């Protein structure tokens, strides 16, 4: 099993009364860095390590300080927030700007990397999407593998994945 982490901006707040009372620029307004709906995907598999690349200078430093530990935990396959949220693989967190906080949803995504030969990648992706327990699939043509996102409560079996690839005249060489 492999893991990714999706971070979505779900809300932004602004407290002008606090800004006017405490800030050097009393009309700072909302956070200019993020917008509601912005999504960032972090992964650490193969030669990808977007935790360092995406976090290094592409995120607001204050926000990164608050959310990076949850992202790192998710990328290692850990429980992000056991007994706090209704799904321990998800966390709601915010940056520490008290006058214009940004609220993030941080989710661990579980998936299997499927390497195969002889099958069309797009066809294998379509078959994998239809499998019981599959939350989605993505053919990564540039990498040469298929990612099958799985429901952690009812994961897709390796046998089912092999059957889907076989139905496209392919043969699975590895599932990681």
Image: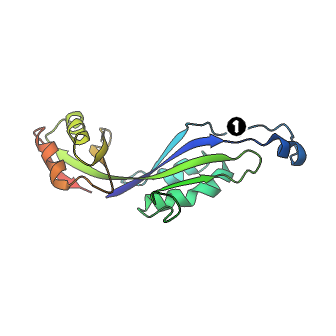
Residue at image x 68%, y 52%? Answer: 62
Residue 65 placement, left or right of 71: right
Residue at image x 88%, y 45%? Answer: 24
Number of numbered markers: 1
- Neighbourhood count class around disc 1 (C-alpha, 10 Å): few under 14, some 14–19, many 20 upward: few
Instruction: In the rendered view, tell whether residue 118 sits above or below residue 108.
Output: above
Residue 81 placement, left or right of 176: right
Residue at image x 50%, y 60%? Answer: 72
Q: Quadrant of the N terminus?
A: bottom left
Q: Quadrant of residue 142?
A: top left
Spot occupied by residue 124 in the image (x, y as percentages of width and height): 20, 39
Residue at image x 47%, y 57%? Answer: 86
Q: Quadrant of the C terminus?
A: bottom left
Spot occupied by residue 120 in the image (x, y as percentages of width and height): 18, 35
Residue 10 placement, left or right of 135: right
Spot occupied by residue 139 in the image (x, y as percentages of width and height): 29, 39
Q: Which residue is mark 1?
A: 32
Spot occupied by residue 5 in the image (x, y as percentages of width and height): 46, 51
Color scheme of the displayed model: rainbow
Residue 62 placement, left or right of 155: right
The residue at the far front in this view is 86
Q: Quadrant of residue 174?
A: bottom left
Is label 1 in a helix, a strand or a loop?
Answer: loop
Instruction: In the rendered view, tell whether residue 73 sits above or below residue 32.
Output: below
């Amino acid at each position: 099993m492999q893991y990714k982490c999706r971070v979505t901006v779900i809300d932004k707040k602004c407290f002008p009364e606090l800004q006017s009372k405490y800030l050097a620029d009393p009309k700072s307004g909302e956070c200019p860095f993020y917008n509601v709906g912005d999504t960032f995907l972090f992964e650490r598999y193969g030669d990808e390590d977007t935790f360092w690349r995406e976090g290094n200078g592409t995120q607001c430093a204050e926000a990164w300080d608050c959310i990076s530990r949850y992202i790192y935990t998710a990328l290692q396959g850990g429980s992000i927030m056991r007994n706090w949220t209704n799904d321990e693989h998800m966390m709601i967190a915010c940056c520490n700007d008290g006058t214009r906080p940004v609220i993030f949803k941080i989710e661990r995504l579980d998936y299997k990397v499927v390497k195969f030969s002889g099958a069309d990648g797009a066809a294998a992706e379509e078959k994998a999407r239809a499998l019981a327990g599959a939350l989605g699939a993505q053919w990564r043509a540039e990498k040469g593998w298929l990612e099958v996102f799985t429901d952690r409560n009812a994961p897709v079996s390796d046998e089912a994945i092999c059957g889907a690839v076989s139905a496209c005249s392919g043969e699975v060489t590895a599932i990681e």
